[in-house]
Image: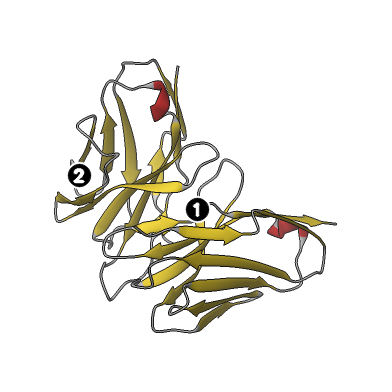
Amino acid sequence: EPEVTQTPSHQVTQMGQEVILRCVPISNHLYFYWYRQILGQKVEFLVSFYNNEISEKSEIFDDQFSVERPDGSNFTLKIRSTKLEDSAMYFCASSERSGVSYYGYTFGSGTRLTVV
Amino acid sequence: KQEVTQIPAALSVPEGENLVLNCSFTDSAIYNLQWFRQDPGKGLTSLLLIQSSQREQTSGRLNASLDKSSGRSTLYIAASQPGDSATYLCAVKDDYKLSFGAGTTVTVRA
């Protein structure tokens, strides 16, 4: 079964540093997403990406965050100047379509980011 | 703003018992609802997807129902096994995102 692949599985970074989280979505999927889960809290939406641009973003997704699809397979989340409160599990997801004809999301196994 | 609630927060049952997990949501204008399983420190595994026009969906020992008008979904797991121990999350899809509940953590005792 096709998978969404995320690397690294765990990253530790010092406060103030920049991190890049990487994802390889399912190859025929068109919509890509980042979600995060702070320990003990709900999974929450960060951003959706379609046709090489952001389609929607949450209030969490401020100027500290950016996303990119640098080539035909990778999808990245960059977090600049990390803060302690950025520590969370970050999930990448992809779906074939959005809107009415919706096939469901496939999530990756996550990157646990620890900011020290 | 969509709010998704899952009750109970935790559940412990002996092996073989049937499980009933509840999910409610405040805004019925959804495209669909998806149930996920999450093992400790791991990713989200999709279990079932119910479109807004459907009433239920089944996969093996799992059955999920959806009452969109009343904002409720129920996940039934028949004949539970220790391997079913995990956190189960429901998520509803609106215009552009999934909104998640906090999950029900299930422990199946051997």
Q: Residues within 10 Å of mark 2 (few under 14, many from 20)?
A: some
Q: Residue tagged by mark 1?
A: B44
In this rendering, position of residue B96 left or right of residue B74? left
Look at discs 2 and 1 and give the one toward the viewer. 1
Residue sitting at x 27%, y 63%: A28
A75 sits left or right of A14 in the view = left
Q: Residue at x 69, y 59 (%)?
A: B84
Closer to the camera, B11 or A5?
A: B11
Q: Could you tell me the amino acid type at mark 1? A: Leu
Residue, disc 2: A69
Q: Quadrant of the N terminus of chain B?
A: bottom left
Relative to residue B55, is residue B31 depicted above or below? above
- Give the structural element (helix, strand or loop) at label 1: strand
Q: Position of residue A24 (x, y in %)?
A: 33, 47
What's the mark number on residue A79? none
Label 2, label 1: how far apart the Cα atoms are:
22 Å
